Amino acid sequence: QRIGAAKQLLLQGTLPLPEVAARVGFADQSHLGRHCKALLGVTPKMLIKERKNLPNPHKNRRDATK
């Protein structure tokens, strides 16, 4: 459950990695990283990179009223 919550926070991109780790109950970002890699097969940094590659729904949004 903590890894799932951390994944959601990392994909939102509003908090730095150490803050995410603390909020979901890990001692530090290294502790989060070990568990994330073991359970998801990716590191938190990989999730952050994935987020950056996702399309931004707010970017290049056309005005629907035109």
Image (spheres, helix red, strand yellow):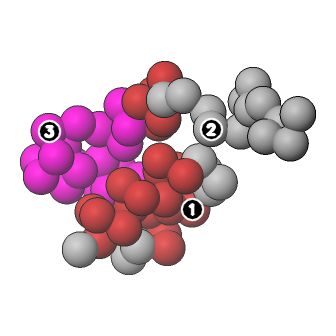
Q: Amino acid at mark 3?
A: Gly
Q: Is residue 44 magenta?
A: yes
Please tell me which residue is depicted at 71% across the width and 39% down the height of the picture: 58
Return the residue at label 2. Answer: 57
Q: Amino acid at mark 1?
A: Glu
**In front here: 26 or 14?**
14
Q: Is residue 39 left or right of residue 42?
A: left
Residue contact at pointers 2 and 3, CB within 8 angstroms: no
Q: Is residue 45 magenta?
A: yes
Q: Nearer the viewer, mark 1 or mark 3?
A: 3
Query: Which element type, helix, strand or loop, lies under badge 3?
Result: loop
Q: Amino acid at mark 2?
A: Pro
Which of the image's four quarters has the N terminus?
Answer: bottom left
Return the residue at label 3. Answer: 41
Please tell me which residue is depicted at 48% across the width and 29% down the height of the picture: 54
Return the residue at label 1. Answer: 19
Please tell me which residue is depicted at 48% across the width and 35% down the height of the picture: 51
Q: Which residues are magenta?
A: 28-47
